[in-house]
């Protein structure tokens, strides 16, 4: 496929790796924020190809993984409400909440439908006027505009049975929270390509300016990731951390203004609770007053019950980059993709699932 | 989750378009990319085009990497 095959060229990749090996003198720690990047790195064995001086850490960039137990419990509680149809991206179904999962309540008879797009959820709402259709809104800035678009569409068409449980998260604030915690020492950041396709590269400026972190926005093919590592190594060897875009075919410095406009018309920033990280100010999105008629949290009276975290699961530490899946006692034993204990093993882009599938024993 | 794949826009009708990805045809929303034209590639994410792919920039990136590769080859040749 065009724009994919060219960026998997083995000869070019070899040259970039050679250049990294030659240029990298001092030990550096880079974090790939996005779970999609983790998959590329693990699948293509990129960590093993890089010199020992370049250490790679996985970040919290997996929306399914960072969805807190209490929020998942809300979705499960909503699915038990009478005359409610839950619509969700497929990844969410198997994530265990405190006492159940969407998959289990579905087996018990709840009407839960996997959709590929909010366009499908709207269609379900149009076809089921006698029921309430709730979309479980998870995702980062890449996805939030598409959910904003669905809410605007529903308002325009007068669809009154469509609701969103807004569990969206924003990326730059959580990176700031990680850097402020001082728990993980980073030199460079591989910034998420498709989040940046929407927000642009400028929201990362603070990391270079205030924290001295080298930042490169990367695409998702192996050559894209290698190129970003090469650029980060060059920046750090030259001692001039800044924000650069490697993924220039998909990302402009200003981002997608139309998508940003839609997102801010429907949503406003709010505090959000991240699994493993806790509450981060201004890192979530809630529906604005004008769109509150679509807010599932306000329109339904439901009780998710007390939150119960699973014992022994270290997803939280893994999401903060403090530990790797190999440090977890449950990994490959009690916790597998077939029987996941934590969300990092459920989502295909969770660190645990990536390690499970691609890291040799 | 933030997966977006290149899709070729074949025809446009209002806020929607017919796009081809890997030989499959799909109806997509172009609400977020009003500037898109027939023949453009877009990044498709959950049924929505989230950006138009800049073909010139893609070529530029590949040119840069190819130049890097020939430079590396020269340098390798110099190493005994």
Image: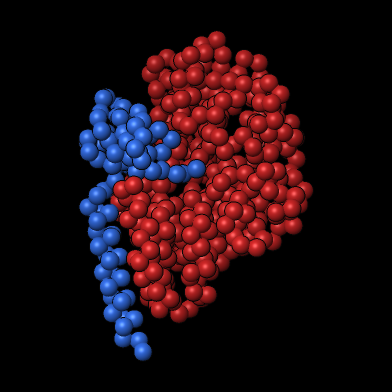
Chain colours: A red, B blue
Which quadrant is the C terminus of chain A positioned in? bottom right
Q: Is residue B49 visible?
A: no
How far across and down, in percent of the image, does residue A332 sit?
A: 70, 54
Q: Considering only vertical position in the picture, is A73 above or below A205? A: above
Q: Considering only vertical position in the picture, is A192 above or below B39? A: below
Image point (38%, 18%), residue name: A156
Image point (40%, 55%), residue name: A221
Indicate left or right for A193 with A302 as reference.
left
Image point (55%, 62%), residue name: A57
Is A199 or A348 nearer to us in this picture?
Answer: A348
How far across and down, in percent of the image, does residue A345 sit?
A: 64, 48
- Rendering quarter of residue A81: top right
Total labels drawn: 0
Q: Considering only vertical position in the picture, is A74 above or below A123? A: below
Name the residue at the bottom extreme.
B80
Q: Considering only vertical position in the picture, is A18 above or below A359? A: below
Is B51 or A239 nearer to us in this picture?
Answer: B51
Q: Is residue A109 visible?
A: yes
Indicate left or right for A222 with A300 as reference.
left
How far across and down, in percent of the image, does residue B79 sit?
A: 35, 86
Name the residue at the top extreme.
A130
Name the residue at the front extreme.
B23
How far across and down, in percent of the image, does residue A350 sit?
A: 58, 49
Indicate left or right for A46 with B5 as reference.
right
Is A163 or A58 nearer to us in this picture?
Answer: A58
Image point (56%, 34%), residue name: A90
């Amino acid at each position: 496929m065009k724009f994919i095959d060219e960026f998997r060229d083995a000869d070019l990749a070899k040259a970039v790796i050679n250049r990294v090996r030659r240029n990298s003198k001092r030990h550096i720690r880079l974090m790939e924020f996005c779970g999609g990047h983790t998959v590329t790195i693990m699948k293509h064995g990129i960590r093993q190809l890089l010199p020992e001086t370049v250490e790679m850490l996985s970040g919290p960039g997996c929306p399914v993984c960072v969805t807190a137990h209490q929020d998942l419990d809300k979705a499960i509680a909503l699915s038990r409400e009478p005359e409610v149809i839950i619509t969700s991206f497929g990844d969410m179904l198997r994530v265990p909440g405190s006492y159940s999962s969407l998959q289990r309540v579905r087996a018990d008879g709840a009407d839960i439908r996997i959709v590929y797009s909010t366009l499908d959820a709207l269609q379900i709402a149009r076809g089921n006027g006698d029921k309430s259709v709730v979309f479980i809104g998870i995702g980062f800035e890449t996805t939030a505009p598409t959910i904003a678009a669905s809410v605007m569409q529903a308002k325009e068409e007068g669809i009154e049975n469509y609701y969103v449980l807004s569990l969206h998260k924003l990326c730059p604030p959580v990176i700031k929270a990680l850097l402020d915690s001082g728990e993980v020492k980073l030199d460079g950041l591989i910034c998420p390509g498709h989040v940046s396709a929407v927000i642009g590269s400028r929201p990362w400026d603070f990391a270079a300016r205030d924290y001295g972190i080298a930042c490169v926005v990367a695409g998702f093919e192996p050559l894209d990731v290698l190129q970003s590592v090469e650029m980060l190594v060059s920046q750090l060897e030259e001692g001039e951390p800044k924000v650069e875009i490697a993924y220039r075919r998909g990302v402009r410095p200003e981002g997608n203004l139309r998508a940003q406009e839609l997102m801010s018309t429907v949503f406003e920033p709010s505090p959000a609770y991240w699994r493993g990280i806790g509450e981060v100010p201004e890192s979530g999105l809630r529906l604005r007053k004008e769109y509150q008629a679509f807010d599932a949290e306000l329109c339904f009276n439901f009780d998710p019950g007390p939150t119960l975290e699973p014992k022994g699961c270290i997803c939280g530490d893994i999401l903060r980059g403090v530990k790797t899946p190999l440090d977890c006692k449950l990994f490959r034993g009690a916790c597998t993709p077939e029987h996941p204990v934590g969300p990092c093993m459920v989502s295909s882009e969770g660190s645990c699932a990536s390690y499970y599938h691609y890291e040799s024993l | 989750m933030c997966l977006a794949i290149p899709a070729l826009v074949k025809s446009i009708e209002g806020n929607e378009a017919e796009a081809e990805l890997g030989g499959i045809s799909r109806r997509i929303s172009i609400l977020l990319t009003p500037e898109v034209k027939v023949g453009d590639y877009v990044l498709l994410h959950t049924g929505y085009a989230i950006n138009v792919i800049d073909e010139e920039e893609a070529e530029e990136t590949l040119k840069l990497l190819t130049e890097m590769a020939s430079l590396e080859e020269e340098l390798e040749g110099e190493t005994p």
